[in-house]
Amino acid sequence: MDNVIQIKIPKDSSKIDVNNLGEFIWWSAHLGTGFEKLMSAVEKVGNNSIVVRKYLFTQATLKSQ
């Protein structure tokens, strides 16, 4: 059995697929955030990558003030 996880560039860059671990790891690295924060963001605002990026940026900006 092959237990290797491959990080994959998303097939659809407009959506964050939380069910595809390889793509989810890619999104986490691409957005510079941890898995938990990314999952929380997707649960709050949906899986649209632009909306998630804006949400994460807003959260980071609010915390730095």
Image (cartoon, grey):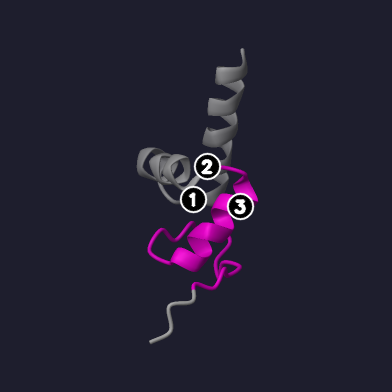
Q: In the image, residue 40 lies at what x, y percent? A: 39, 40
**Dot placed on the residue nearer the N-terminal end, 2 or 3:** 3
Between disc 1 and disc 3, the foreground one is: 3
The residue sitting at 56% across, 67% down in the picture is 10
Q: On the rendered image, what quadrant is the C terminus found in?
A: top right
**Dot placed on the residue nearer the N-terminal end, 1 or 3:** 3
Magenta: main secondary structure? loop
Which class describes the residues within 10 Å of circle 3: few (<14), some (14-19), or many (20+)?
A: few
Q: Are marks 1 and 2 in contact (CB under 8 Å)?
A: yes
| Vertical relation: 54 (above or below) 14 | above
The residue sitting at 43% across, 67% down in the picture is 20
Q: In the image, residue 17 lies at what x, y percent? A: 44, 61
Give me the C-alpha separation between circle 1 and circle 3: 17 Å
Give me the C-alpha separation between circle 2 and circle 3: 17 Å
Three-letter amino acid code of the residue under disc 2: Val
Is residue 29 among what the camera can see?
yes
- Which circle marks residue 29 in the picture? 3
Q: On the rendered image, what quadrant is the N terminus found in?
A: bottom left
Please state which of residues 46 and 7 is positioned toward the viewer in this rendering. 7
The residue sitting at 42% across, 43% down in the picture is 36
Three-letter amino acid code of the residue under disc 3: Ala
What is the span of residues highlighted in magenta in the rendered image?
5-33
Give me the C-alpha separation between circle 1 and circle 2: 5 Å
- Tell whether 11 sits left or right of 41: right
Q: On the image, numbered disc 1 is attached to which residue?
A: 48
